[in-house]
Amino acid sequence: METTSITGAKIVGVDIFGPATQDVSRLAAFYRDILGMTPTELGEGGAEFPLADGSTFGMWKPEQPRSGAGYSALFAVGDINAAVARFREQGAELGDPFETPVCFISAGKDPDGNEFYIHQRKTSD
């Protein structure tokens, strides 16, 4: 199969990821107040939360209503048990952490019903 190289057409990373919502204030408050993320942009039409790895978690209010169960996000943490305990204390509903071959993970849902995960990668020593 022949391929065509078009300058600028290669996907090089994720600039922003996140859900649509009909209530930006409520959903942004969950991620800010419960999970401790800090928004740099917050308005009626959306919010953005830059993360330490250079990616951005965001949400927006589309003109046509749609929200809930529309995406998944895995938020990286250094200690799965400490993070789950802290977020539960803040009011997050999270499942018990479990181990996979490559990580430790806990599943939750935000106020719009979107799935999110607290995720600790295993280190290779």
Image: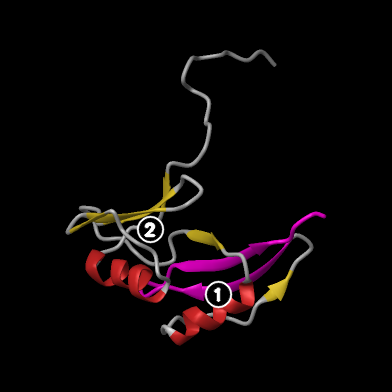
Give the left or right position of residue 21, taking residue 92 as reference.
Answer: left
Tell me which amino acid carries mark 1.
Ala
Stretch of the chain drawn in magenta: 103-125
What residue is at 75 percent from the left and 57 percent from the top? 123
- As measured in the structure, the alpha-carbon distance from the residue carrying label 2 to the one carrying label 1 is 22 Å
Give the left or right position of residue 24, taking residue 119 as reference.
Answer: left
Q: Where is residue 84 in the image (x, y as percent from the top left)?
A: 56, 78
Q: Can you tell which mark lies on residue 83?
A: 1
Q: Is the magenta stretch mostly helix, strand or loop?
A: strand
Circle 2 crowding by C-alpha within 10 Å: few under 14, some 14–19, many from 20: many
Residue position for label 2: 19
> Tags 2 and 1 in contact by the CB under 8 Å rule?
no
- Helix, strand, or loop for circle 1? helix
Quarter of the image for residue 24 reads bottom left
Q: Can you tell which mark lies on residue 61?
A: none
Q: Position of residue 90 (x, y in %)?
A: 42, 83
What residue is at 52 percent from the left and 37 percent from the top? 13
Q: Is residue 121 magenta?
A: yes
Residue that lies at the very extreme toward the left in this rendered image: 44
